[in-house]
Structures are given as structure tokens and as C-alpha cells.
């Protein structure tokens, strides 16, 4: 498997419940290297830009309101097969359908309040990483 990088977000619901330490611990235990990490609060416009692919969907307003409602952690994770591996560690979008032991199953509250985000493909990862990190921030 090839060494990859993926974007991971710890969403406002997890930060507001002080779960970032638990999630970071799970990232380390899963064998990822954290290439970059920053905390921020997205503006509504920034959230809309990041989730522009979902603009026509009925959940877009709620999603962007939620993602701009509080502090997030943005990370670049690196590992062999990082994209698939991170999605496995996170679990399914709906915590009720996520596998036991995954972040979303154990810590998520709903489809929206599911604690984390991860890129779904190499092309998406490249775009998402560049949305949050400038080239000089990559170690």
C-alpha cells in the first residue's frame, strides 16, 4: 500500500464535549503520523466553500451552520492507505450504523454530530488539505 495523506477534521460537537484528546489518542493508536494540525473556527462562508459539493443538498444550510458553530481541529494524517484507514477508524457517517469500536459509533451523537470528517479519495484529500493548509505548513 502507498503512503498517503488525508484530511481529518475534529468537528465542533466533539470539541465542545472536550473529545479532541480522545480522538487524537485514537489517531496515534491507529498508527497515523500527524503531519500538520491547527485549530480554528470556520466562518459561515468558509464552511460553505469547504462543503460546496453539497450546495444543492437539503442538509447544506444545517451542515454549514453546524461547521461554523464552534472550534474545529484540522489535521493532515499520513500512513500507508491513510484515506481508507482513517475512514475505517472514523466509522460510518451515521453513528448507529458505524462498526463497534469506531470513533463515530462510540462518540458520535447523530449523522451531523458525528465528531469527525475524512477525505474519501486521493483527489478529494488533495483539495481538502489545500483548503486548510498552505504548502509551507506541511512538514
Image: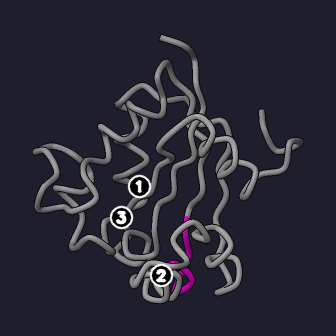
Foreground label between 1 and 3: 3
Using the image, tell me which numbered label, if any, was put on residue 60.
Answer: 2
Q: Is residue 31 left or right of residue 17?
A: right
Mark 1 or mark 3: whose residue is earlier in sequence: 1
Q: Is residue 112 above or below residue 93?
A: below
Q: Secondary structure at mark 2?
A: helix
Give the numbered dot on residue 74: none
Report the side of 34 relative to 94 (left or right): right
Q: Where does label 3 land, which residue?
A: 115
Residue tagged 1: 21
* Label 2, label 1: how far apart the Cα atoms are: 28 Å
Q: Is residue 139 magenta?
A: no
Q: Tell me residue 66's x, y (percent).
A: 46, 84
Q: Residue at x 52, y 50 (%)?
A: 8
Q: Nearer the viewer, residue 75 or 117?
A: 117
Residue 34 in the image: above or below residue 100: above
What segment carries the magenta color?
A: 67-72
The answer to the question of whether label 1 and label 3 lie on touching residues, with beta carbons closer than 8 A, is: no
- 62 up-or-down from 5: above or below: below
Mark 2 and mark 1 lie on one chain; the one further toward the N terminus is: 1
Instruction: Kindly check if marks 3 and 2 are in contact, taking CB atoms under 8 A apart as contact.
Output: no
* Secondary structure found at label 1: helix
Image point 40% across, 59% down: which residue? 116
Amino acid at each position: 500500500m502507498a503512503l498517503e495523506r488525508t484530511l481529518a477534521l475534529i468537528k465542533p460537537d466533539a470539541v465542545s464535549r472536550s473529545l479532541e484528546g480522545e480522538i487524537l489518542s485514537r489517531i496515534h493508536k491507529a498508527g497515523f503520523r500527524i503531519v500538520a494540525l491547527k485549530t480554528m473556527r470556520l466562518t459561515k462562508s468558509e464552511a460553505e466553500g469547504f462543503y460546496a459539493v453539497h450546495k444543492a443538498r437539503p442538509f447544506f444550510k444545517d451542515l454549514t451552520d453546524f461547521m461554523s458553530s464552534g472550534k474545529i481541529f484540522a489535521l493532515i494524517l499520513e500512513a500507508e492507505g491513510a484515506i481508507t484507514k482513517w475512514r475505517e477508524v472514523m466509522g460510518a457517517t451515521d453513528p448507529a450504523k458505524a462498526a463497534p469500536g469506531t470513533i463515530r459509533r462510540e462518540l458520535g451523537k447523530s449523522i451531523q454530530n458525528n465528531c469527525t470528517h475524512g477525505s474519501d479519495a486521493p483527489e478529494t484529500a488533495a483539495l481538502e488539505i489545500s483548503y486548510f493548509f498552505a504548502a509551507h505548513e506541511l512538514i
